[in-house]
Amino acid sequence: MKPLFSILALTLAGLTSPSHAANDFPQHPLELIVPFAAGGGLDQNARSFADALGKVLGQSVVVNNVAGAAGTIGMQRVARTEADGHILAFTPAVPISSGPHRLTSVTYTADDFDYVCQVFDNIFAIAVPAASPYQNLGQLLEGARQSSGKLSYGTSGVGSIPHLGTANIEHQTGVSLNHVPYKGDGPMLQDLLGDRLDFGAVLASSITGQIQAGQLRLIAVYADKRHPAFPDVPTLGEAGVPVVQLSFGGVVAPRGLPPPVLAALEKACADATQAPAYLENARRANQVVDYISSKGFRERILEDSRQQADTLKRLGLDKQAG
C-alpha cells in the first residue's frame, strides 16, 4: 500500500495538471488584443466578435488595442504571453505573414503562434474617381502604358497589402505605376476624391459611402472572389491579370495552447461567427465573414507568409529597420 502522503501528492498533482486546467477553461475573463488603433473597421469588427465570443464562453472578452509598427508591437506582446488561452489576438494576417520578413525589429515568426480560427476576409479594390476615364482594369493598364510610369495610385503605406498587390500587378503586366504612400487611408482618400490620384488601392468596405454617393467607382478587387456587397466588380483574375492579394484574419494565440483549450476556443469561434448579432453588424459594415478552422487558418497563414517573403524580397523591402 502506498503511503498516505504519496496518494495526496498524486491527487494534488492531478488537480493542478494542465489537462485539469484546460477542462476548466476559461477560468476568468479573456483579453482580445487588437494590434491596431481603436476606431477603425478592424477594431469595430473585433468588439462585435468579442461580445459574441464572450456569450459563447460564458466569460467577458475585453478588447485591448496595442497599436504600432504596422501591427507588430501588439503581436510581439501576444507571442511573449503565457499560452493558456486567456490572452488572444484579433488580427489580420499581415503583421504575422509580412512583418517578420519586412522589419528587423520583429522577433517572432509565423511559427510562434497557434491559430484558433479565421473569422474574416478583407477585400481590397482599385477605386477611381467618378470622373475618371477608366471604366475597367484594361483601360487603366493601357493608360499606364501610355503615361510611361506617371499614372499615380495611393495606398495606406509602403509594404501594405494594397501596395504589394499593385506591385504584383506591375510585375505581371510589365506596366510602371507611380506609388504614392500615405499614413493611412484617410489622407489618401482626400487626394483620390480631389482627383489628385489616378486610383486608390483601398479596402472596399471602407469606402461604401463614397461609392453609394457616386464619388468613387470600383473597377476590380484583389481577392480570389468577388466582394458580396459589390457583386458586379470583377476580380483581377477575371479582368485578365493573374494576381491575388489576400487579406484575411482571425483569432490567434501564443504557441503552445493545451489541445483541449485550443479545441474549446475553436468551437467557440465557430459559434461566435454564426451569432445573429455579429452577422448583422458585419452585414451593415460590408465586412465579409469567412470562418475557417484552426488547421485551415494555419495553412493559409503559412502560405501567405511564403508569398509575402518572395514579394518583399523582389521589391527590396525585406528586413527594413523599424
Image: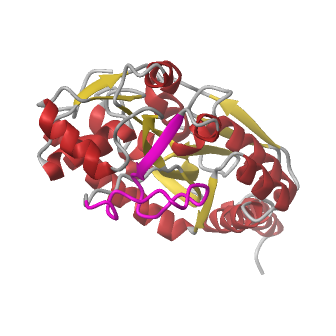
Residue in view at x 20 percent, y 48 percent: 310
Q: Position of residue 312 (x, y in %)?
A: 22, 40
Residue 198 appears left or right of 319? right
Residue 206 counted in the magenta span: no
**Image quadrant where residue 131 sits:** top left
Residue in view at x 14 percent, y 39 percent: 145
Whether 174 is drawn above or below 193: the answer is below
Q: Nearer the viewer, residue 250 or 131?
A: 131
Residue 68 appears left or right of 262? left
In terms of secondary structure, what is the magenta stretch mainly? loop
Q: Position of residue 240 (x, y in %)?
A: 26, 61
Residue 231 counted in the magenta span: yes
**Do we see residue 297 in this rendering?**
yes
Q: Nearer the viewer, residue 208 or 256?
A: 208
Residue 310 appears left or right of 237? left
Residue in view at x 21 percent, y 38 percent: 143
Quadrant for the N terminus, please: bottom right
Q: Position of residue 267 (x, y in %)?
A: 71, 68
Give the farthest residue toward the bottom.
1
Quadrant for the C terminus, please: top left
**Do we see residue 27 in this rendering?**
no
Whether 281 is drawn above or below 198: the answer is below
Q: How many marks?
A: 0
Q: Nearer the viewer, residue 150 or 182?
A: 150
Residue in view at x 27 percent, y 54 percent: 306
Q: Position of residue 92 (x, y in %)?
A: 51, 45
What span is colored magenta in the figure? 216-240
Whether 265 is drawn above or below 35: the answer is below
